[in-house]
Amino acid sequence: MMEKAKTAILIVLVVLSLLQSYLLAYSMPGLGATVRSDQDYVNAEPLGKTTSVESVIFPEELIIHMGEDKHTVIYPGTQFYEMILNQRIVGREFKGFQRSTASILDWDEVRKDSIGIELRFADGISVELLQKLLKMEGDLLFLRDKIDKIWIFKTTDTEEIRTFFFSSEEHVVYESVRADLTVRDVQDYVGFGAHLPQYRMTADGLYIPVEPIMATELIYPYETYSPEQMQRSLPFDSSTTRSFEDRSGSQIFTDGKRGLKVEQDGMWINYTNPAATISSDTPLSENVYASVDFINQHGGWDGTHRLISSTPEQEKKYVTFRQYIDQYPVIDNLAFRYGHIRLTLQQGVVTEYARSLITLSAQTESRKPRWLQGGTRLEETLERYPRRGEVTALFPALRAVLLEENRLKFIPVWVVKLTDGSEVVLLEATEGEQPVEPNTGNGTADAHTDQPGHADATGGQEEQTSAGAEQGTAPGDGPGTGSAVLPPQETENNEEPVDPDDPDSPPDDPSGAEDEEQAEVPEEHVPDTEEQGDPELLRARS
C-alpha cells in the first residue's frame, strides 16, 4: 500500500514539474517581466548619405620632391591629387617589408636631390586600416604598427625606386623591397608637381609656399535636420521618450537611459548611451568600422570626411572624422561648432555621439577668390607666433562663419597644429589680386607700396588678420581638438637696425607704418572672370 502511495505522489510531482516548465516556456502576458530588445526601438527613414571605411582613409597631403631642393604640396580633392593617388598609387602592391632604423639614409639629402613623393598621415594610421587604401603584405610586427608617412623616390645615381614606410614609433622605417612601382611612375608624379606652386621647407620640416597661393571663399545655403528627425533616427524607446528644456535653453530628449541634447539653436547634438559593459582596450580598426556603420544608420554623412588619427591612448575609445570642402578641411571652432563628427566607444558600442545637424546645399551661392599668404610674410608671421617652438604642422583650412538666412561662409586660413594637439588660426586669406612678395630685389615691393589707397588697404588687412586669429582649437579630453585663441602680436622695439644700402632691406614707409603692415597690403586689382578660369591652372600660375 505504501509503495502505491509513493508511486502516486511521484507521478503528481512529475506532472506538476511538466506543467511548471510549460508555463515558464509559454507564459501568458503579465505572468513575467517584459524584456525589450533593439527591435523595440523605432528607426525612421535613414538621414544623409552612407559611406564606407575606404572612403574616409586618405593622406592629408602629398609632397612632391622635384630635385634641386624644389618641392610642392598637393591637397585632397584637387585634380592632381586624384590623378596621383587613385590612378597611380592605389592598387599597386607593396611586399617584402624589411625593418630598419631611420638613420639608414640621409633624408635631408634625399629630400633635396632625389625626385619622389611623400604621402603623409598626421599622427599615423594603423597598417590594418591603411590596407583599405593600399595592397600590402608584411610580417606580424609590421601589420601591428602605425604609419605616418610613405616616401617613394628614385635614387640619384641609379634607376632604382625605393619605398619606405615610416613608423609612428620614432626612428623606425620599413622598406618595401618588392613595390609595384617604376621610374616612369615617379617621373609622372614630378611632372604633375611642375605645374603647381613651389614650396620651401623650414628648419623644423614645415613646408611654406614661396609665393601666395590662390584659395576660394565660399558661401553655401544650408538646411538642418530637425531635432525630432535625429531623435527618431537614434535608438530611443518611443514609448517612454520625453523632451524638455534645461536651464541653458538646450532641448533634451531621454527615454530614461539614452539622452540627446540639442544645442546651438538646433544645429548641434550630443547623444549619450551609457554602456553596461566594462571598458576595455579595443583595436582602433574595430572602433572605426563600428563608427562608420553607426553614422550610416544615424544621420549619415554630409560631404567628404577623413578619419583623424589621435594618440594611442585616445584611439582606444575615441574616433573623429573631419569634413573637407573642396580641397581644405574645416577647422574646429568653439564659437560655432561645425565640420567634425566625434564618437566615444566601449567594446565597439557607441556611448557618445557629437555632430552637426547642418546639411549644405549641393551648389554654392557665391565663390570669391582670396590669397593665402606665402613666402616671407607667412614665415615672419609664423616666427612671431608666441608658441612657435610647439608648432608641428602648418596647413590651409576653412573657418566656418554663420550668416543670416541659412547660409554658411567658409574663409580660407592658415592653421598651425601644436604638440598638445590644439589647432590655431594663424593668418586669414587676403582679398584682391595676388599680393607681391616683399624684398624681391627687383623693385616690385617699392611699386607695390606706392599704389593709391595703400593706407586703407593696410587697415583692412589688419582687420582680416585679427579676425583670423580669433578662432582656433585646443586639446580636450576626447579626440581631435577643441578651442584656442592666437593672441594679437605687438611689434618689438629691439629690432636689429637695417642697412639702407643693403639691396635686400625693405623700403622705407613714407607714411610711418610698420614694415609688417606694408607687407600685408594686397594690390587693388581683382581678377576678372576670364582670368579666373580653371582653379587648377590658377593655382599653377600662383
Image (tube, grey):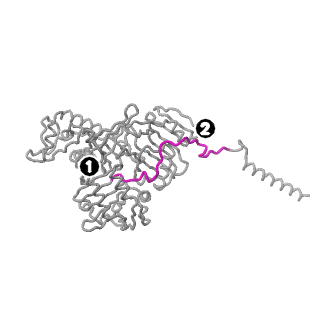
48 drawn magenta: yes
Q: Is residue 38 left or right of residue 535?
A: right
* Residue range (magenta): 33-61
State the image coordinates of residue 228 (x, y, percent, origin top left). Answer: 52, 36
139 vs 16: above or below: below
Q: In the rendered image, which residue does mark 2 sit on?
A: 239
CB atoms of marks 1 and 2 within 8 Å = no
State the image coordinates of residue 430 (x, y, percent, origin top left). Answer: 26, 39
Q: Nearer the viewer, residue 187 or 344?
A: 187
Whether residue 32 is visible here, answered yes or no, is: yes
Q: Secondary structure at mark 2?
A: loop
510 vs 309: above or below: above
291 vs 255: above or below: below
Kind of residue at disc 2:
Ser
Kind of residue at disc 1:
Ala
Q: In which quadrant is the N terminus drawn?
A: bottom right
Magenta stretch: dominant secondary structure: loop
State the image coordinates of residue 64 (x, y, percent, origin top left). Answer: 29, 56
Q: Nearer the viewer, residue 18 or 162?
A: 162
Q: Nearer the viewer, residue 343 or 120?
A: 120
374 drawn magenta: no
> Which residue is outermost to the front?
530
- Residue 35: quadrant of the picture: top right
Residue at image x 41%, y 53%? 57
Q: CA distance from mark 1 to mark 2?
A: 60 Å
Going from N to C along the chain, the mark reached first, 1 or 2, is 2
35 vs 160: above or below: above
Whether residue 122 is visible here, answered yes or no, is: no
Q: In the rendered image, which residue does mark 1 sit on?
A: 540
Q: Secondary structure at mark 1?
A: helix
